[in-house]
Image: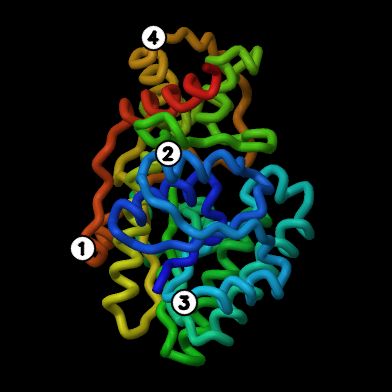
Amino acid sequence: MAVLVNGGAGFIGSHTCVELLNAGEDIVVFDNFYNSNPQVLDGIRKITGRDFKFYEADMLEMSSIDDIFDENDIEQVIHFAGYKSVPESVKHPLKYYSNNLRGTFNILETMKKYGCTKFIFSSSATVYGIPETVPVKEDFPLSAINPYGSTKLIIENLCREMYTANNAWTFILLRYFNPVGAHKSGLIGEDPGNQPNNLMPLVLDKATGKRDVLQITGDDYPTRDGTCIRDYIHVVDLAKGHVSAVKKARELENGCKAYNLGTGRGYSVKEILDTFQRVNNIDLGYTIGPRREGDAAECYSDPSLAEKELGWKAELGIEDMCRDAWNFRRNKLI
């Protein structure tokens, strides 16, 4: 019996593969390398000392997914694959709906065909829209303010409705906050093939000279230093949350549960930048720009439900995130 990791060569997927293998799980991985690098697979093998079966496949091709299930005894599926850029989704909503929804439909239909009923979904804090209060809890109202968030929310709703229709299913919906960092080995980390729009890849581009200007979007928010506050979580902690979810899904006969995966505290943009400069001895020379439309001043999680029911809690701090992210990027330059 194996765990199928869809999108396992991506940033979060690759770190989850490492933690699953280290926990003694057997995995099957598939990815189409749309926004990832095949070299990541060697990094996973080097870190863990274990091999695994890999398929280069696209979730939009039903026959490819069918082949994977036909050739392997799949117990659970962790679904990471999908387009994930908020700005791009605003410009190309049809592209996002078509890929993210059709791909998920194909996976769930194939799971149903083969009697595989345990599905762990890579969701996002975007399903909360702009929360009125913090910390954000799982029972907060759900909404979507961009096409990317809409696809996450639609898939969450589909999981809930599928469970209502047939309670043989087990769905675990993991709502991420802001993953950063890299594996401490420096062998795998965040390496977007497309134009980055998250804070840490932009910081790394500036630190390496790939980017001439690093601009903060607003310093006049009603926060402790005027910059936006977010719940940044180390990607290794996030990956370990998936291992806990796999174990929980195995214990449950059925169900549909959502969990926040975050640290439970917020770091400001300036705190991230200042910590990165201090722990890595780098002067970023960032500038201040206007606010970005639609940004909430503060958004951070209440992760207590995940601690209570999954036995999981984030352990790594902001210094680890900044140090490990730079270690990975520096290794790429050598």
Q: Quadrant of residue 187?
A: top left
Q: Nearer the viewer, residue 4 or 192?
A: 4
Q: Amino acid at mark 1?
A: Lys
Q: x%, y% of residue 98?
A: 75, 64
Report the Cα–Cα distance between label 1 and label 4: 38 Å
Q: Residue beneath label 1, please?
A: 308
Q: Earlier in the sequence, mark 1 or mark 4?
A: 4
Q: Position of residue 288 (x, y in %)?
A: 57, 17
In what element is the residue under mark 1? helix
Against 18, is 70 above or below? below
Mark 3–mark 2 contact, CB under 8 Å?
no
- Of marks 1 and 2, which one's residue comes earlier in the chain? 2
Find the distance from the CA under tag 3 to the CA under tag 2. Answer: 40 Å
Amino acid of disc 4: Asn
Q: Nearer the viewer, mark 4 or mark 3?
A: 3
Q: Earlier in the sequence, mark 2 or mark 4?
A: 2
Q: Residues within 10 Å of mark 1 (few under 14, many from 20)?
A: few
Q: Residue type at mark 2: give it.
A: Arg
- Distance CA(mark 4)–CA(mark 3): 49 Å
* Residue 302 appears in the figure: no
Residue 230 numbered tag:
2
Q: Is residue 96 visible?
A: yes
- Closer to the eye: label 3 or 2: 3
| Distance Cα–Cα, label 2 vs label 4 | 23 Å
Query: Looking at the image, is mark 3 or mark 1 earlier in the sequence?
Result: 3
Q: Which mark is residue 73?
A: 3
Residue at 70%, 74% (x, y): give it. 62
Q: Tell how many labels.
A: 4
Tag 4 residue? 281
Name the residue located 27 percent from the left edge and 46 percent from the top edge.
314
- At label 3, which amino acid type do we have? Asp
